[in-house]
Amino acid sequence: MQDTFPQQLLKLRTEKQLSQTELARRLYVSRQAVSKWENGDADPSIDKLILLARIFKVSLDYLILGIPNHNNLILQLKHVAMNFNTPVLKDVSLSIFNNERIALLGSNGAGKTTLVRIIENALTPTSGTIEWQINKKDFLNIMPQNDLLIPALKVKEQVALAARINKVHNPERINRLLERFNLKAQQNTLVAKLSGGQKRRLSLIISTLRQSKLLILDEPTVGMDLESIDYFWQFIDQVTGSIMVITHDFNQIDKFFSRVLLLKDGQIRHDISVKEIHQHNQTIEQWYRQVN
Ligand SMILES: Nc1ncnc2c1ncn2[C@@H]1O[C@H](COP(=O)(O)OP(=O)(O)O)[C@@H](O)[C@H]1O
Ligand SMILES: [Mg+2]
């Protein structure tokens, strides 16, 4: 095993805010085993390495060698601009890699939703390019800010339709999602009759039915009750692939994200790792209040 592994393990475990005991529990090993790995006194087996990479949501290369794999590029925006009556986006350049947890922050009207709509190809930018390294049609999932639901359908029909469109045949998973997001009892309710929070939960289920390489969620928790919000963040932590979330739930960003983007004056003004902000003894909220 390379010398970098013990350092990487310690670094990733600290970033994830996991104790040795917690990590050991998730790996089905003793705390002493984790301690030995971190001290370089023993090496984990390959199946534990694979599990570690999954827990930390990093590639094996990164876990073992500390090399960020830039072949893992998902998407690259170059000098994207968007004018409506006035310029909303002026010059946005941005790369998104595999297994990132990105919080896209910015004031109301900063252009966050516009940026998402450009990425999903619902809007054509005034200038600039978007280059995909994945098959966008199969691997991009979006939960838009405005729920794209069909009012005349029953909840279960809406879900069934989305499952068909996404070619997902997994009734158990769908059932579990409906249960966990508290929509089981509403299965026969018309979408039109749902509350705002219920619609949000239904949109979330629909946008995560299939696996994605990039999942973008535009203000997902708005209108949800506290219980659903808590479950939402747990759920999102289990989703594989990269995630970009537009959110104002600042306390969650500290826990669940690896990277923060701040959109201001039509540009990505800051592109910074959560770790770096924490190293300056700031929470994301404190940092945001200072820079925005
Ligand atoms: N289709 C549109 N036509 C005209 N102006 C728009 C349109 N969509 C968004 N805008 C304007 O662009 C700005 C950014 O909007 P938006 O991207 O929704 O911001 P955010 O999601 O950051 O709150 C706002 O001033 C909004 O009014
Ligand atoms: Mg918006």
Image (cartoon, rainbow, N blue to C red):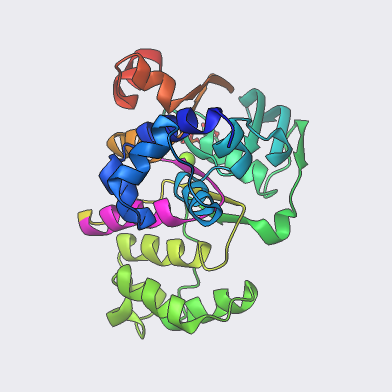
Magenta stretch, residue numbers? 227-247
Residue 27, picture quadrant = bottom left
**Residue 10, percent across and down?**
40, 31
Q: How many marks?
A: 0
Q: Is residue 73 visible?
A: no
**Residue 179, percent across and down?**
32, 75
Quadrant location of the N terminus? top right
Which residue shows up at 52% across the image and 57% down it?
A: 47
83 above or below 239?
above
> Would residue 181 appear left or right of 242 to someone viewing this image?
left
Residue 185, picture quadrant = bottom left
Q: Nearer the viewer, residue 6 or 59?
A: 6
* In the image, farthest residue toward the bottom: 188
Q: Is residue 225 visible?
A: yes
* In the image, farthest residue toward the left: 226
Residue 248, picture quadrant = top left
Q: Nearer the viewer, residue 179 or 111?
A: 179
- Report if residue 134 lies within the magenta region: no
23 above or below 105?
below
**Residue 283, percent across and down?**
30, 24
Which residue shows up at 66% across the image and 43% down it?
A: 119
> Would residue 44 appear left or right of 181 to someone viewing this image?
right
